[in-house]
């Protein structure tokens, strides 16, 4: 994996727009050609992080999801931002679409109308053995083709067979916890669960 020069990083950051950051610095930057730079600061053991940096794991997961016909951003490059500090990054074409948290906030009627399809999508992920721990509204996009796509899937797991009841319940609980943490009011939770049950009936 190539190491980005200080100059290049400086250009990305100075000409780009920081979309997401935390106390350690920028996390997602829109660089000048419109691509997104997603920066990973590893918290794993240095040896492991150097062998399989987060950026590579992210890119592998994108390929695996795409092979399962799950839409994800197209990864153009993986690189080291700072190898000593275990900071790696992916440069990718944004996936076209609207994050569901924004849709929920701005176009509530449209969001509500999508609930059956969203539930069927989550059901499909589960049937394909995909356990997405960061399953929440900020990480699912409604794509222009009327479908959905995933971003921010570093912690996704591929179980190799449909998720059992316990994992399904735990995964849906992640979404519920997110809604509670964010204090999202009036989310149609019961309706989403009803739609999920419906989707399970037709797809089990
Ligand atoms: N592939 C993408 N396509 C469109 N928007 C994206 C994409 N990746 C990130 N974003 C935007 O950046 C925000 C944060 O990205 P994300 O990868 O979820 O990082 P975080 O770890 O901060 O949650 C998203 O909510 C979205 O608005
Ligand atoms: Mg996210």
Image: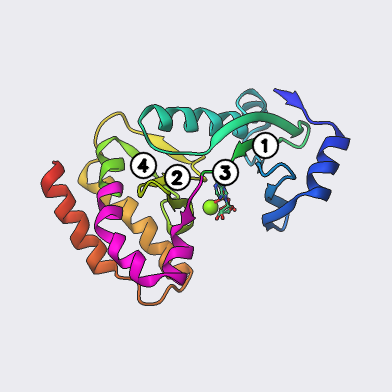
Tell me the CA gap for discs 2 and 1.
Answer: 18 Å
Judging by the rendered image, the residue that carries numbered circle 4 is 131
Judging by the rendered image, the residue that carries numbered circle 1 is 89
Single out the residue that lies furthest toward the bottom: 185
Tag 2: Cα neighbours inside 10 Å, few (<14), some, or many (≥20)?
many
Q: Say which of marks 4 and 1 sits in front.
A: 1
Mark 3 within 8 Å of ligand 1, using the beta carbon: yes
- The label shown at residue 40 is none
Tell me the CA gap for discs 4 and 2.
Answer: 12 Å
Tag 1: Cα neighbours inside 10 Å, few (<14), some, or many (≥20)?
many
Question: Is residue 156 left or right of 2 when viewed as pictured?
Answer: left
- Residue 6 covered by magenta stretch: no
- The label shown at residue 94 is 3
- Which of marks 1 and 4 precedes in the sequence? 1
| Spot occupied by residue 111 in the image (x, y as percentages of width and height) | 35, 65
The magenta segment is 96-121
Question: Is residue 33 left or right of 186 when viewed as pictured?
Answer: right
Label 1 SS: strand
């Amino acid at each position: 994996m190539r190491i980005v020069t200080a100059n290049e990083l400086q250009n990305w950051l100075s000409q780009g727009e920081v979309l997401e950051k935390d106390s350690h610095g920028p996390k997602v930057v829109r660089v000048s050609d419109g691509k997104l730079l997603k920066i990973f600061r590893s918290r794993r053991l240095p040896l492991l992080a150097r062998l399989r940096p987060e950026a590579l794991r992210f890119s592998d997961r994108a390929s695996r999801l795409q092979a399962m016909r799950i839409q994800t951003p197209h990864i153009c490059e993986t690189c080291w931002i700072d190898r000593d500090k275990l900071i790696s990054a992916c440069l990718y074409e944004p996936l076209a679409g609207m994050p569901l948290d924004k849709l929920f906030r701005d176009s509530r009627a449209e969001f509500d109308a999508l609930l059956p399809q969203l539930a069927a999508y989550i059901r499909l992920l589960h049937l394909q053995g995909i356990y997405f721990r960061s399953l929440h509204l900020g990480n699912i996009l409604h794509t222009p083709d009327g479908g959905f796509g995933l971003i921010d899937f570093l912690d996704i797991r591929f179980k190799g067979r449909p998720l059992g009841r316990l994992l399904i319940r735990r995964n849906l609980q992640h979404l519920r916890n997110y809604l509670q943490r964010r204090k999202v009011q009036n989310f149609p939770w019961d309706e989403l669960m009803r739609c999920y049950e419906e989707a399970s009936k037709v797809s089990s």
